[in-house]
Amino acid sequence: MKHYVIIGNGTAAVGCIEGIRSVSADGGITVISAENHPVYSRPLISYYLEGKTDLEKMRYRGEGFYEINGCRVIYGRKAVSVNTSGRTVILDDGSSVPYDSLCVAAGSRPFVPPFPGLETVGKKFGFMTMDDALELEKALSEDARVLIVGAGLIGLKCAEGICGRVGSITVCDLADRVLSSILDADCAAIVQDHLEKNGISFLLGDSVDKFCESKAYMKSGKQIDFDVLVLAVGVRANTELVKEAGGKVNRGIIINCRAETDLEDIYAAGDCTEGYDASTGTNRVLAILPNAYMQGYTAGVNMAGGCSVHDRAIPMNSIGFFGLHMMTAGSYEGEMTEEKIPAGIKRLFIKDGILKGFILVGACERAGIYTSLIRDRTPLDTIDLELTKKVATNLIFSQESRRKKFGGIV
Amino acid sequence: MKRVYVNEEWCLGCRLCEYNCAFANSGLGDMVLALKDRKIFPRIHVEGNDSITFAVSCRHCTDPICQKSCIAGAISKADGVVRIDRSKCVGCLTCVLVCPYGALSPGEDGIMQKCELCLENACGAPACVTGCPNKAIVYEERSDPE
């Protein structure tokens, strides 16, 4: 009987476990978990600080998940290397775990630039894990001045989460706009304005030159006094295990659409990987939760001898701040169409007769119809393109297509 | 399993399904009390134009992408029915972003809700179907995609 090993205990690991069990009930699964928690929803840590969920509800799967799926979890241990000839994973206590089939779902870690003086800062935190959130929570007080370095998804969700529990929040970023990885300049301006109205201050196009205890000296010459520092500059994929074992890595562990690395019987999934982006046709790191689950699931199915291909992944995000919701997907190449509506703005990007990407701010109704057009690479001459630009509706499809969708099993 | 199917050629666009859905999931016994002078948040909605109308609700997909994409692990599937645990949902709307049918929308509180075939409420069978005056919405067993 096969023995499966999964390095990591996050969303990709759950996908892998459920993928394996969708094919086979046989064989044990060992999960190596660096964190001392059963799997929880990482993106919910900001909602936890905001009081919109609690530690119990943050559990990504129910009580008994591991037992039901025949998993043994090794908590609090890190995998330090993979011995491909002996087919074992070596842990940080020197013990080894044998595998027949291995999935590396090791996630990512915060990237912290070498700021001079960072070591002199007393209260500094990352914002990726449940433990990060619990540590940060201890430092919150109603008069605390918080400086967040990084105006990306993590930094801004953190800002929203703690906003009601601190005195002030300043967010700085080297980029000249908020959410620069998912929004263009115009849309970012709308979102920034909304965040400012909710009490968040920004220093954009600026970066920290050095820290000295509770003061940040910016490149622009500005100085910021703070009590609490949150570092949310970016993340790096954990590629080392596969790289040192001789596997191919770039910015992430390179995998194909079957979630295979180029090492025999070693798969990889989630934020540590670089896989196929169907919206650009190239490989890239797609560090988003749905992709982690789906890659993990595909890995699991294939590890257990089934056949699964995950070839329709695209970058996509749905996120809201203080009641303003935005959704983005795909890549922003080609011709842009814009529709301004009272509630917000809608931008679609069309190239070679196919929808490549979109940005929706405040107008997210039925956005999944747009997402499916990107994922399915639907030729736009087969649907009502003019209507599509205005509104996401099933009316854009042919009657025959609707008959299949709403009159059949999908 | 039985699912809700829609035949747009018979749909009158009367939107009774929306009202019956909102009432069925209100937990109240009086339709006037449940719906009068209130903005409703049904789990089925009618789309259309001057000549075509049709109702859209969860397809209870064989391989539900909403479940795989839910960042809170709040969506599950058992016995063919895709359900949401509203106590776990944080309203991120990722399910709205991925549902290819545009079938999902949040409730009044911003937290997601979805068609669970009226199996969880007092109706026991989909209220949209029971109340459809022209039988444009049916609840039945069908085999393969047509």
Image (tube, coloured by chain):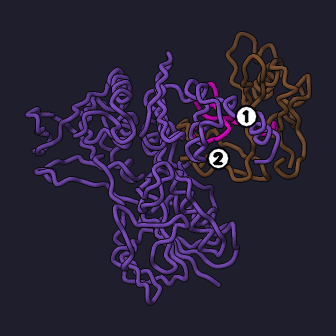
Q: Which residues are magenta?
A: B95-118
Say which of B2 and A313 sits in front. A313
Circle 2: element type? strand
Relative to A82, does residue A118 appear above or below in the rendering? above
Say which of B92 and A184 sits in front. A184
Whether residue A17 is visible to the viewer of this picture, yes or no, is yes
Give the label, 1 or 2, closer to the camera: 1
Circle 1: element type? loop
- The colour one sees for chain B in the rendered image is brown
Q: How packed is label 1: few (under 14 Cα within 10 Å), some, or many (20 or more)?
A: few
Q: Residue at x 36, y 79 (%)?
A: A246
Magenta-colored stretch includes residue A33:
no
Residue B121, picture quadrant: top right
| Residue A398 badge | 1
| Residue B75 badge | 2
Numbered disc 2: what chain? Answer: B
Tell me, by letter, which chain the rendering colours purple.
A
